[in-house]
Amino acid sequence: MNNKIKKIINKKNRSKIVCLTAYSKNIAEIIDNHVDIILVGDSLGSVLYNYNTTRKVNLKMMLEHTKSVRMGVKKSLLVIDLPYNTYRNKSEALKNSKKAIKETKCDAVKIEGGIKVKDIVRHLVKNKIPVLGHIGITPQTVKGKFKSKGKTETEKRKLINDAKELEKSGAFGIVLECIYSDISKKITNLIKIPTIGIGASVHCDGQVLVTDDILGLTNAKIKFVKKYTNVKKIVNSAVLKFKKEVKSKKYPSKKYSY
């Protein structure tokens, strides 16, 4: 286990873990100063490519974006999402995880699922591949409309069992997505590894959001998304000024000419 992962685990019950997504060097450089984990999420499918599902994201896309992000990361733990249909069995998962770490120099992989992927998680960890788990809403396998999890007793039991099995299998942490507050609190208290929430309440050991969402670059209208600024307005203002200066021949002046 590398030191960055040990630091993340040691934050449980001590200090909140901050996690954001990045898909390029420029954004990674900025957020690296403030976060503990940078996730190259398959959310790039909807954010950058306008896909209606993360299932359309492939490994090649993930590797290229992670290579870019790696150039901007100096201190944060860098995690890559293994996309849909890249970890259907133990050998496929290991092959693609090794490829991801070798080509991108990332620190860990994230895979979706609970009990169903426990043997895959165990196999990866046994082969020195650090794994971040992900339960609750799992976008790669969800059918129909996204619905928060943990409302019924059956769902609660399943989520608890999923979390326990991922911990037993060696995952160093678990993302809890869109899980009711009471059950996310219970899971966080039951397991010794950190939980990172996204729409899963303040009771988790940390929080993750999509950077483009908090910057107001997307039109995401999701309950858990908070927009902290409106970068679209800033970009619009800069482009408008450029346009005016080009039209009026103010740009390029002598200062910006050879």
Image (cartoon, helix red, strand yellow):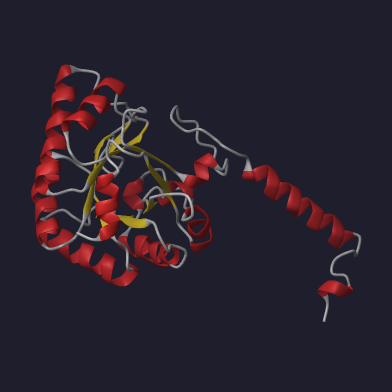
Which is more toward the observer, 173 or 90? Answer: 173
Picture coordinates of residue 246, whole percent (x, y): 84, 62
**Residue drawn at x 35%, y 27% as measured from the top left:** 201
**Residue drawn at x 63%, y 40% as measured from the top left:** 230
Asked if residue 82 shows in the view, the reply is no
Check the picture and name the quadrant holding the N terminus. Answer: bottom left
Picture coordinates of residue 192, whole percent (x, y): 18, 38
Asked if residue 7 shows in the view, the reply is yes
Which is more toward the observer, 232 or 196? Answer: 196
- When the figure is inspected, residue 175 is found, relative to residue 107, above or below; the finding is above
Check the picture and name the quadrant holding the C terminus. Answer: bottom right
Which is more toward the observer, 245 or 184? Answer: 184
- Residue 133: quadrant of the picture: top left
Position of 125 with respect to 215 (left or right) is: left
User: Which residue, as the protein is rendered here, is positioned at the far bottom?
Assistant: 258
- Residue 2: quadrant of the picture: bottom left
